[in-house]
Image: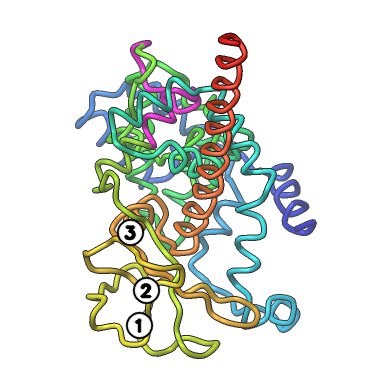
């Protein structure tokens, strides 16, 4: 962790300015933006003439995938990947912060739950895992980051070129200086960490101020809910449940969010905590722990969460954080009801 922090700080302090208007590929990109979108050519030349090359993001998307050193392999052994992942994602502190975040924007959460059919706790959990409820939205300059990743050689050049195009259009539409926007090392923006293309398709102006701002909690909350709904979230349906199997390591069937099964074909596997009211096909989600594999059924809604981030571990962290937040919310609501009832009885007496 200390090494990673040092590397980020070292990279940020050693950024090299580059004039991308001297690159043929960039000039072609500029010409296309002018021709297809009528963007001011002079402004584009000014933007691309002084870009600080983002070394850290570039390293993260380097084409060369290095094999972990023996030291790293020893520190992170074969088993326990889930234990290490969830340790920093689902914590009592993050649950507590989630409750506070929901209470702060309670009316917005209640409105989006009615409008989009997404449970409050799942929207909060995504924002909690993405940016710790807005506390860490990223410090990388989005324009410079996307330019670096679009034109410096890496394994996702075309993807980032498209994101750069969408970001410029977004900045032009909302009349903001693209140089002033900060985000993640991948160019993701706001509390929900939307890439520019997602910003365009799923962003919601929920506070009705005439623009979509994913740094504004109300817009961000609604946009996350809209994203889940548009990707097929099933209202009032299950997300996941833990199941039992024989043994400590599971190898009987292929696991992962892309593989579906009829439950009747999964021999020797059943819900661990009683009946699970879900009749559709399920995914088998394996969580690699130090001493055993934890196995879960994932429903359609679990798959929907993986559309936000293509990782079963990410989706499971969202689910477990949401469950903990939801449990606390229900407990608080019951306490309030009991207290209100007690006060009413006292008035009657």
Q: Is residue 257 left or right of residue 218?
A: left
| Residue drawn 29% across the image and 45% down it | 236
Q: Identify the mark at residue 284; answer none if there is no mark.
A: 2
What's the residue at 29%, 51% (across, down)?
237
Q: Secondary structure at mark 3?
A: helix
In the image, residue 314 lies at what x, y percent? 49, 58
Read off the residue under disc 1: 254
Report the Cα–Cα distance between label 2 and label 1.
8 Å
Image height check: is 260 above or below 278? below
Q: Are marks 2 and 1 in contact (CB under 8 Å)?
A: yes
Q: Residues within 10 Å of mark 2 (few under 14, many from 20)?
A: many
The quarter of the image holding the C terminus is top right
The residue stretch that appears in magenta = 209-224
Distance from label 2 to label 3 (Cα)?
A: 11 Å
Task: Please report contact status of discs 1 and 3: CB closer than 8 Å, yes or no.
Answer: no
**In-front residue for pair 139/241:** 241
């Amino acid at each position: 962790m200390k090494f990673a922090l040092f590397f980020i700080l070292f990279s940020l302090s050693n950024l090299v300015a580059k004039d991308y208007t001297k690159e043929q590929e960039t000039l072609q990109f500029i010409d296309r933006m002018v021709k297809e979108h009528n963007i001011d050519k002079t402004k584009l030349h000014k933007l691309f003439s002084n870009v600080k090359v983002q070394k850290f993001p570039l390293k993260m998307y380097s084409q060369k995938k290095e094999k972990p050193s023996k030291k790293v392999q020893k520190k992170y052994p074969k088993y326990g990947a889930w234990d290490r992942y969830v340790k920093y994602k689902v914590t009592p502190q993050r649950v507590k912060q989630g409750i506070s975040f929901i209470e702060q924007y309670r009316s917005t959460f209640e409105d989006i739950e009615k409008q989009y059919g997404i449970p409050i706790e799942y929207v909060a959990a995504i924002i909690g895992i993405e940016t710790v409820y807005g506390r860490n939205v990223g410090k990388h300059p989005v324009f410079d980051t996307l330019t670096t990743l679009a034109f410096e050689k890496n394994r996702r050049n075309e993807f980032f070129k498209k994101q750069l195009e969408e970001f410029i259009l977004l900045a032009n539409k909302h009349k903001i200086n693209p140089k002033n926007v900060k985000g993640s090392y991948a160019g993701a923006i706001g509390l929900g960490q939307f890439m520019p293309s997602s910003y365009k398709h799923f962003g919601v102006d929920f506070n009705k101020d005439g623009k979509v701002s994913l740094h504004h909690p109300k817009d961000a909350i609604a946009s996350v809910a809209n994203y889940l709904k548009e990707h097929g979230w099933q209202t009032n349906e299950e997300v996941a449940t833990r199941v039992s199997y024989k043994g400590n390591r599971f190898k009987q069937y292929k696991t992962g969010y892309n593989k579906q099964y009829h439950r009747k074909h999964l021999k020797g596997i059943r819900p661990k905590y009683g009946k699970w009211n879900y009749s559709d096909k399920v995914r088998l989600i394996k969580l690699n722990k130090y001493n055993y594999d934890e196995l879960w059924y994932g429903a359609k809604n679990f798959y929907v969460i993986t559309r936000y981030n293509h990782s079963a571990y990410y989706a499971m962290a969202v689910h477990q954080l949401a469950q903990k937040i939801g449990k606390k919310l229900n407990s608080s609501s019951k306490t309030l009801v009991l207290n209100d009832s007690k006060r009413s009885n006292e008035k009657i007496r």
